[in-house]
Image (spheres, helix red, strand yellow):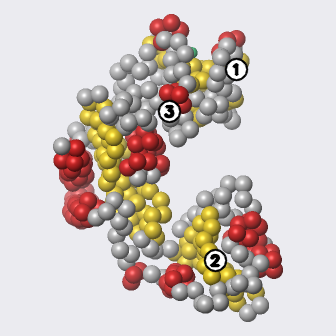
Amino acid sequence: MIRNLSLLRAGVLAALALCGVVAGLATISEAPQAQLPPPRTMLPEALAIALERAKLPAPESFIREERLQRGDTIATLLARLGIGEPDARALARLPRVRQLRPGTTVSAEVRPDGTLVLLWFLSPRDLLVRIERLGPGLAASESPAPIATHQEMKSAEIRSSLFAATDAAGIPDAVAMQLADIFGGDVDFHRDLRRGDRLAVLYQMHTLQGRALRAGRVLAAEFLTQGRSLRAVWFAAADQEAHRGGGYYAPDGKNLRKAFLRSPLEFSRVSSGFGMRKHPFLQTWRAHQGVDYAAPTGTRVRAAGDGVVEFAGRQGGYGNVVILRHGGNTTTLYAHLSGLAAGVRKGARLAQGETVGFVGQTGWATGPHLHYEFRVGGTARDPLRMALPAAQPVPSAELPYFRALGAPLLAQLDLLSGTRIALFE
Ligand SMILES: [Zn+2]
């Protein structure tokens, strides 16, 4: 049984390694935005027709594409698509249309008089939804969309902020946020970033007909900061794989997840760089035994580690404050919150990364910021300088598999570093 499993894994591994190298080379040799050609034979009929029509609209009709914006109504979206009153009303009654989520791109073929010929979009479950004229009425149908996945490799150098760097390199926000999470046990992306830090990342990109749909999982990444090189490889050990889980490990198999996050402040486009514009250190750590993060009101504050709520409520100068008790003698404290997350009350259990509350300026605060304390046995410690215990490493029985799986990914990171260095010289 075990032998069979490892044979199967070895086969999958060989296939993965081959794909990885091929995809990597293809990405490097082509322009950065180049996409792999779509596998035409996999086209379901529905999409083929939709795309055929998209390319060649009947002379008397036109194709428009609009994204449902936050704050949009279905009616305003359908109006922008050029769909006239009677059809717009009929469409707005269809459950599939009423359930459209902000961010969804909707395409429509419409006649000049506003009559709908065909409307199509991708559902959150990756079904291609088509609504077309059938006699006097409209008929809806759906079929699985032919989504392809390939790997992309990008590198970036930090000049001002992480997002400025990832924007310049064409790295999607979802990947930037994953990077902040992956290295979140080692690096506080709000304070530790330095000009000249570099990152390289290999990630999945899902495409539909050669068009980027969304970024997938980061497969491997490297972060070079202040003379340190941090590398991460995605890996699912056998017991994790059964639950579709996995994690990020250093090339030697150490787990990158630590007992505590370096920063409890959620990293986002809005919160990143806020501290640089405002005053990052309202006071020094030594003066008040905590770390202050200037951040916009409402920014999510996360539990730094697994713990139980010891106090949640108002307390003098702290304003709205939450204190979590963790394993051993460690407590963490989050102050000046504008509000607490639902269910955060004394005795509640929170897992690392779960929302504690939101940044505010309650209590003695001159501007919106998070005041964060990390105490061991009641004594304040500097959370940015603590050595933190790591989660379980790759099980030793799985190390050969992990190394074999990681080798081609790390080789691609090396290739990326090499390319970059060559370019800079
Ligand atoms: Zn403070």
Q: Nearer the viewer, residue 391 or 146?
A: 146
Residue to which mark 1 is pinned: 362
Is disc 3 surrounded by few (<14), some (14 to 19) or many (20+) residues within 10 Å? Answer: many
Residue 308: image location, x then y, percent? 57, 26
The 10 Å Cα crowd at callout 2, few under 14, some 14 to 19, many 20 or more, is many
Looking at the image, in which quadrant does ligand 1 appear? top right
Q: Hey, what amino acid is under mark 2?
A: Ala
Mark 1 against mark 2, which lies toward the viewer? Answer: 2
Dot 1: what SS? loop
Mark 3 = which residue?
A: 273
Q: Quadrant of residue 63?
A: bottom right
Alpha carbon separation for disc pair 3 and 1: 22 Å
| Quadrant into which the C terminus falls | top left
Q: Earlier in the sequence, mark 1 or mark 2?
A: 2
Q: Amino acid at mark 1?
A: Thr
Mark 3 or 1: in front is: 3
Query: Badge 1: how crowded within 10 Å, few (<14), some, or many (20+)?
Result: many
